[in-house]
Amino acid sequence: MLIRYGIPRGTETLTIPRTERTIRRIIITARHGSITLDVFQWIQGVGMSLYVIRDGEYVCYANSTFYDANLQRAQSLAAETSTGVEIVRYLLTHKVRGQRDVLKELNPEAAFAFERYVRRMTAAKTLEQCHRVEREAAKAYWTHWADVSLRFSGRVKTRWKRFGARKSSLSSSARLAENPPNAILNFAYNVLANEAGAGCLALGLNPLLGLSHKDNTDKPGLAHDIMEVGRPFIDQAILNWIGARVFKPNEFYELDNGVCRLDDDLLSEVAGIVVQCLPSFVHHWEWVAHRLVDDATGTASKKRTPLTEGNRKRRFANAS
C-alpha cells in the first residue's frame, strides 16, 4: 500500500508491503484526500483497521468482520427488553466506578462522595434511571477537572492552559473544543469510538444498533454504548500523560471558528495512548456479546473472544 501525505506543504511517501502483519490500525486525520477500493480490500484481507477521523468526528472504519445473524437479531431485540437494561446498567456501572477511581487522584473527598452514583447506578431498573444517574454523575465528575492544566515551553493564550468546562461555548456540548485539554480528550474519545466500532464488527455485533444510544445517523449506537466503559481508563491515561509532559505552543492550532486542534505528531501520540489502554477494558465488550449470545439461538451459541484472545490463551494453557 502506498500512502502520500503532506500536501500542500510537501509530499512524503510511505510504502506498506502487502505482506505486512504487524501494523494493526491506520488512522487518517486529513480533511482531504482519497482511498482506493483496493486498499479497503487489502485491509480487510489482512485484518487491519482503517479509521478516517475528520473535523472531530469519525467517518468510516474498515476491519475484518464476523457475521452472525442470530447474534445481531438478539442485539436488535434487546433494546426493548430487560437484557438491554442489564447490559446498559453493566456498562454504566463500570463507567461511574472508573470515574470514581479517577477522582481519587484529583480529589479524594469528591471520590468518596461520588460513591453514591455507583450505588444508584447499580440499583437502576430502567434505561431512564441509568441515563439520569449518568448525567448527574458526569456533571459532578467534570466539575473536578476544571483546574487540570497543561504546561507549555512558551507563551500561549491563558485559556489554553486550563481544562475549564467540559462544555464548549461553540457547540453547547463537548464538541468543538476551545482549548488544548478538551481537544486532546475529544480526539482520544474519537479514536476510542472507532476502536469500539471495530470491536463490534470483530464480535459479530452491528455497531449501528444501540441499546442506550438509539438509532442516530451520526453515531453508531452500540459502538458508543460500549465505549462508555473505556472512557475512565482513557481519562486516567490522559491525566498521567498531561502531568508528565511539557507541550510546545505550535503543537496546537486554532481554526477560524475558534476550534482548537492538535498537530499530526500529537494526534499520533494521543492515538497511541488510547490503543495502549484497550487491554484494560475490552473484556467488557466481549461480555456484552456473550450476554447477547445467551439470548440468541443456533449458531450464536459459541462465545468468541477475538479481542482478549481468552479462548486461545486457555487452549494454550491447557495444552501446556
Image (cartoon, rainbow, N blue to C red):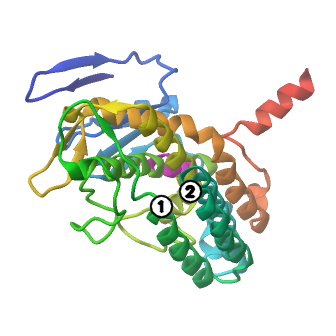
Q: Is residue 134 magenta?
A: no
Identify the residue shown where x is 44% and y is 48%: 194
Q: Earlier in the sequence, mark 2 or mark 1?
A: 2
Q: Quadrant of residue 9?
A: top left
Tell me whether the residue at label 2 lies in contact with that at label 1, contact meaning CB atoms closer than 8 angstroms: yes
Q: Amino acid at mark 1?
A: His
Q: Give the x, y percent position of residue 289.
A: 68, 57
Identify the residue shown where x is 39% and y is 31%: 245
Q: Main secondary structure of the magenta part?
A: helix
The one nearer the camera, 16 or 266, is 266
The one nearer the camera, 136 or 106, is 106
Number of dots carrying numbers: 2
Span shown in magenta? 194-201
Q: Amino acid at mark 2?
A: Asn
Disc 1 crowd rating (10 Å Cα; few below 14, some 14-19, many 20+) is some
Cα distance, mark 2 to mark 1?
7 Å
The one nearer the camera, 175 or 118, is 118
In this rendering, is residue 125 above or below 294?
below
Q: Quadrant of residue 250?
A: top left
Identify the residue shown where x is 51% and y is 75%: 135
In the rendered image, the residue lying farthest to the front is 109
> In which quadrant of the rendered image does the N terminus lie?
top left
Question: What secondary structure is marked by label 2?
Answer: loop
The one nearer the camera, 106 or 44, is 106
Horizontal side of 258 relative to 216 (left or right) equals left
Q: Which residue is mark 1?
A: 144
Question: What secondary structure is marked by label 1?
Answer: loop
Confirm whether residue 74 shows in the render. no
Horizontal side of 232 relative to 193 (left or right) equals right
Using the image, tell me which numbered label, if any, was put on residue 107.
2
